[in-house]
Amino acid sequence: MRTPAALLLIAISATLAGCSETATAKVEVTLRSTAENDGKIVAFIPKGSAMKVSKCSHGWCQVSWNGHQGYALAKNFSVPVRANSTTETGDDDDKRDDGDGSND
C-alpha cells in the first residue's frame, strides 16, 4: 500500500510531466547538477523563492532558478494547484544539506 505522501508525489509528478510550473521553496533547496544526493551542488535556493519546475521522476524534479539549471528533491517545494490552493510535496522539517548529502 502506498502512503498518502507517495500518492501525492505521483500526482504532482504527473501534473508536471511535460510542462513547466512555478513552485515555492518550503526550505532552503539544494539545486544539484544531477538527480542524485551526491550530484555537484549548483546553488542553494532560499526558502520562499519561486522557481520553475518541469519533469519529475523518482522524487527529483528539473528546476530552473535565477539562471541556474539543475535537479532538486520534490519534497522541498510546493506547487500551486489550479483551484487556487497549494499542494504540499513533503514535510516542513526538511533542513539544509549538512554536507554529507543525506538531507537534501
Image (cartoon, rainbow, N blue to C red):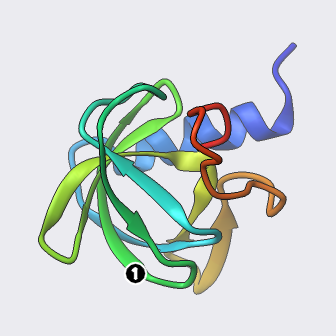
Q: Is residue 12 left or right of residue 53?
A: right
Where is the C terminus found, in terms of image quarters? Answer: top right
84 or 44, which lies in front? 44
Q: Residue at x 54, y 71 (%)?
A: 25
Q: Position of residue 40 (x, y in %)?
A: 29, 36
| SS state under label 1 | strand
Q: Could you tell me how many numbered marks the image carries?
A: 1
Q: Is residue 31 left or right of residue 4?
A: left
The image quadrant that residue 57 belongs to is top left
Against 77, residue 51 (above or below) is below
Q: Position of residue 77 (x, y in %)?
A: 56, 63
Residue under pointer 1: 50
Q: Is residue 26 left or right of residue 60?
A: right
Against 59, residue 95 (above or below) is below
The residue most toward the front is 99
94 or 14, which lies in front? 94
Q: Is residue 31 left or right of residue 47?
A: left
What amino acid is labelled 1 in the image? Ala
